[in-house]
Amino acid sequence: MIIGWILIGFLLILNVVATAEIIRDRFSEKTQKIFQGLAVWFIPLLGSILVLYFLRETIKTRPAGYKDTWPGGYDDGVLRQGDATNNLADHAVDGGGADGDSGGSD
């Protein structure tokens, strides 16, 4: 009986890891991710192993220090206001030249 619970626990952990990797994958389309997720949960051992096998290149090529926003989405690489590397929000747009002229006709 205990071996059965250990096997169920192992399969559950494997499915959760495979599902997390599907969500973190930035190169698959939404439809592909849905079918991969269905394969993981409806074909427990084989689905997880196959998905992790096919995603192995994506997992290995993540840069050092890679962080995503999972759960709740993924990092699409777009800089947004408030990002540490986005200093555009720190500069006000004055709409004109250096002399304060707005560029319009007087």
Image: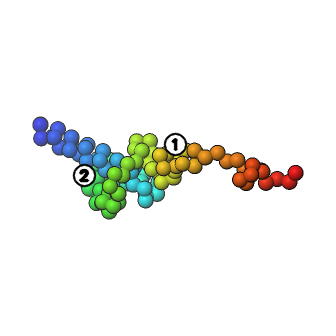
> Residue placed at 25% from the left, 47% from the top?
14
- Residue depicted at 40% across the width and 42% down the height: 71
Q: CA distance from mark 2 to mark 1?
A: 42 Å
- At mark 1, the secondary structure is loop
Horizontal and vertical percent position of residue 42: 32, 49
Residue 37 vs residue 17, the one in the foreground: 17
Nearer the N terminus, badge 2 or badge 1? 2
Residue 98: x and y in percent read 71, 53
Residue highlighted by disc 1: 82
Question: What amino acid type is highlighted by mark number 1?
Answer: Gly
Instruction: Tell which residue pokes out farthest to the front in this image.
Output: 99
Q: Which residue is mark 2?
A: 45
Colour style of the rendered protein structure: rainbow
Q: Where on the picture, by quarter, is residue 105?
A: bottom right
Quarter residue 59 falls in: bottom left
Residue located at (64% from left, 45% from top): 92
Q: Residue at x 34, y 51 (%)?
A: 65
Mark 2 in CB contact with mark 1 (< 8 angstroms): no
Q: Between residues 99 and 72, which one lies in front from this camera angle? A: 99
